[in-house]
Image (cartoon, rainbow, N blue to C red):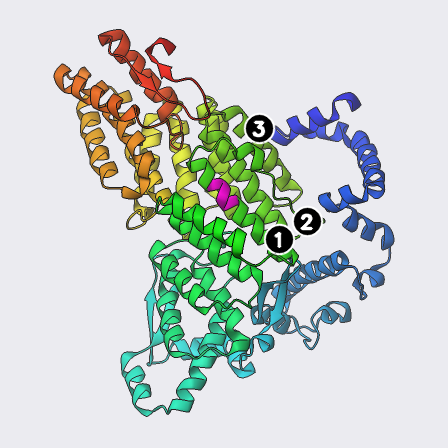
Amino acid sequence: METCLCSAIHTLAKEYDEVQAKELIPALNRHLKDLRHFLAQAKSLSRSTRLTSPLSINYRLDQDVDGFWAGSDDRVHLELRRRLACVVIFLRSKLDAQELASPQVAEVFPGLQNFADIRKCGRKVFACHKDDGEVEQSGAAKCGLPVDLVDLLCDETKLSEIIAGPWITNRVQEDNSISWSLCPELMSTFADILLAPTIEELETTAMKLLCFVTPLCYEGNTDWSPSLKETVWPIFERLLKTYKIPVSFRTQVIEVVLYFGERDSVAIRLVAVKQAKILLRKTMPYYLHALVVLFRSILFRVDADLAKSEAHIRDFMWHGPRPVTRRDHALEGRIHISQMENEIKCYDNDVPSCAYKWEAGQPLSTLDMEVTFRLQSTAARYFQSIGDFGAAKSSLEQFLSLDLINPIRANSCRVLVGRLGDVYCEAGEYLKAVEILKPELDRIDKCDRMRRGFRRLVLASVEANIGSTRLDTAESILQGFLGDLPNGPDDLHDQQLHMRILLAPARIARLRADPVEAVLRWRFALEQVNNMHTLGSSGGFIAAVIHLSLAHAQLSLGDKDGSHHSWTTGLKILTNEKCEFWIPVVPTTWLQKVAADIYYSQGWPFRMMLPGGEPDVTQHYF
């Protein structure tokens, strides 16, 4: 058993067997002992794996309970103590919320005695990134909020009484969350009677409250649903126009503005990034300048303006400030990734050589790990973009396996799993795709169903079911998914996903030998792609795919003239457009099957240019 321990662990992780697992206990104990000794000697490696510190705490405090709860200069020890205290507080408060906490637990939360108060204090903190790239929890007092207001908002009984009052109206959002506001009559009264100093004080409190409750920026934070952001942004935007921001408070306000510039509604993002640029000053920290440049470059790219996106990044790299802190260095990594994205879109052959020019500092901070995750995902996307699915598969599998050591943010994990599912479909491993997609789909809640990560997972699942010839299942998944689509695809990525949604039922109809339905769906898809300007060259390629697929369906109806016209139109487009792999299976298995059928039945030629310097695919390829 010792000679194949890694293989046995890998097998049991996929197909657990209690008997075999028990047989591994002696070997695992020896293996873990050797691993501890190994990490104790390899300091740099132990920092990267982040295993030594918790183990050293175990060695030092094995039977010393009082020592574990005592103060310490060890950051990992303090964090472990805080987490265990939170578990104790949650469980004990369920039994008796008013019971006094033990001295050891109460010491972790100074000034609070019973479990109910300690649980409420968790609502009185906000998070921010420090210069070292770690997240710091700060109290409401640091944000400048009145203590009475915070206590009121955290008192569920008093808050419920206020909400139930006659002057409060409520509205259910798209994600089923509820928003409350003052009724119009009371608002009108306040507008008439409040004096200017009082209004100014209320504006200050409102701005501080927004800064307090808004989640952290960076790395695609999804704590707030798109509908919640669309509700809060107009309030925040109005406040920005009337509130005179003190110099000492400007950095916090810009960070909140940039949160709205990071993801979801493109219209809001455009206004938010523009507003952040107006508020920015040359003397402000590098990371704020970098975030504005990063989000502007992304917005240019999703509008298919790669030249502006690249020019914006290069101008900042040549003439902008230089990174100073660990946080600055991580944001420099994000800008590097944005530049990689531009190069991938332009089929730049230098992507592999420059991909890892940015390296995270050691030991890895929380922010460093998030940027590293994104870098690895982008590298996999490059391999996928040139049709090197084997390299993309290996990269994604290796990276997702690290989730057991350093858990990946849920949203990032969905993107990676969705992409790996697509790659499995390219390789014909449809059952494997379903296997990895199902757990992620099962974890999706109502709020997440509006997001792009969910759409990617669903479409990968549809593709896997089409490949497995479970056409009814694929169609059912699509139908159940259509109700969660956003109002309109407003950027490049949304439009690409929209086209995937349209092409899937057209292919299903063709595979069911229903050419009439297929022709109707291909024509509708063609109308849609012609209206999507941000798809750019990608739109040209996918239009060619639709024309060629339409020709295939028309031929089945006996419309040879119409079929030949569609075929020649598609081939003409392909003389100027390279193959695009962002819709899995369609440009490879699907299109090549269509071309082979047409060539063998009609003798019509076919030629498609491939990216990455690969030779063209012609009718002689089949």
Mark 2 Cα-neighbour bin, 10 Å: few <14, some 14–19, many ≥20: few
Residue situated in front as seen by the camera: 226 or 561: 561
Q: Report x, y in % for residue 138.
A: 62, 69
The nearer-to-camera label among 3 and 1 is 1
Q: Report x, y in % for residue 87.
A: 66, 59
| Looking at the image, residue 6 lies above or below residue 563 | below
Mark 1 Cα-neighbour bin, 10 Å: few <14, some 14–19, many ≥20: many
C-alpha distance separating marks 3 and 1: 28 Å
C-alpha distance separating marks 3 and 2: 25 Å
Residue at 37%, 70% (x, y): give it.
237
Residue at 35%, 73% (x, y): give it.
238
| Residue extending furthest toward the front | 319
Left or right placement of residue 513 versus residue 408 in this view:
left
Residue 217 visible in rendering: no
Q: Are marks 1 and 2 in contact (CB under 8 Å)?
A: yes
Q: Are marks 3 and 1 in contact (CB under 8 Å)?
A: no
Name the N-terminal-most of marks 3 and 1.
Answer: 1
Left or right placement of residue 401 versus residue 392 in this view:
right
Quarter of the image with the C terminus in it: top left
User: In the image, which residues are magenta?
Assistant: 337-341
Q: Residue type at mark 2: give it.
A: Gly
| Type of secondary structure dominating the magenta stretch | helix
Residue situated in front as seen by the camera: 499 or 609: 609
For mark 1, what is the residue?
329
For mark 3, what is the residue?
394
The stretch drawn in magenta includes residue 339:
yes
Left or right placement of residue 458 versus residue 8 in this view:
left
Q: Residue type at mark 1: give it.
A: His
Task: Tell me the quarter of the picture where residue 402 sits.
Answer: top right
For mark 2, what is the residue?
361
Q: Are marks 3 and 2 in contact (CB under 8 Å)?
A: no
Mark 3 lies on a secondary structure that is: helix
